[in-house]
Image (cartoon, rainbow, N blue to C red):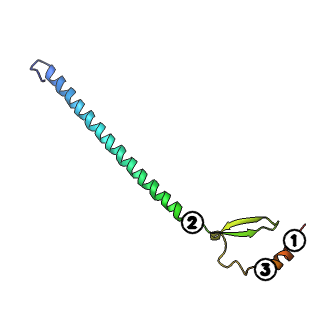
Amino acid sequence: MTAVHCGEPLILIEMENKDKKEARNTRREFLGTGVVAGASIVVGVAAGNLLKEQHTETVKMMTADGKLVEVEKRFLPNKAGKPVSNEELKNWMDNHKK
């Protein structure tokens, strides 16, 4: 492939080197992309598993205006007080109606 003419051997050799460099770069890019894609898949799966494991426990509570809401236990203080009986709740609602 390399002829012994004045300037041609250098040109051919330079072109062959360029082709090799381009091929090497495309392989590196391919491998780099594959590594990044694989890492992102692993991180995504791990994050998905963490979200599934975080089962939130909720408590049903009544607001001051009588609406029933669910609140996550982690937002409540550790000691929320004693449970309220139905009679106490009815009396409270009667006293707080506007």
Query: How far separated are the C-alphas under marks 1 and 3?
Result: 17 Å
Camera-near label (2 vs 1) is 2
Disc marking residue 96: 1
Measured as percent of width and height from the top left, residue 12 is found at 17, 24
Which element type, helix, strand or loop, lies under badge 2?
Answer: loop
Task: Tell whether 60 sits left or right of 65.
Answer: left
Query: In terms of image quadrants, where is residue 22?
Result: top left
In the image, residue 3 sits, relative to residue 66, either above or below, namely: above
Q: Give the residue at x 53% y 60%.
A: 51
CB contact under 8 Å: marks 2 and 1 = no
Number of numbered discs visible in the structure rendering: 3
Measured as percent of width and height from the top left, residue 96 is found at 87, 71
Looking at numbered disc 3 in the image, what kind of residue is underneath it? Ser
Q: Which residue is mark 2?
A: 55
Query: How far separated are the C-alphas under marks 3 and 2?
Result: 29 Å
Which element type, helix, strand or loop, lies under badge 1?
Answer: loop
Which element type, helix, strand or loop, lies under badge 3?
Answer: loop
Looking at numbered disc 2 in the image, what kind of residue is underneath it? His
Point out the tag, 3 or 2, that comes first from the N-terminus.
2
| Location of the C terminus (image quadrant) | bottom right
Looking at numbered disc 1 in the image, what kind of residue is underneath it? His
Q: Give the residue at x 21% y 26%.
A: 15
Residue sitting at the far bottom = 82
Q: Nearer the viewer, residue 16 or 9?
A: 16
Q: Give the residue at x 66% y 75%.
A: 77
Q: Nearer the viewer, residue 1 or 50?
A: 50
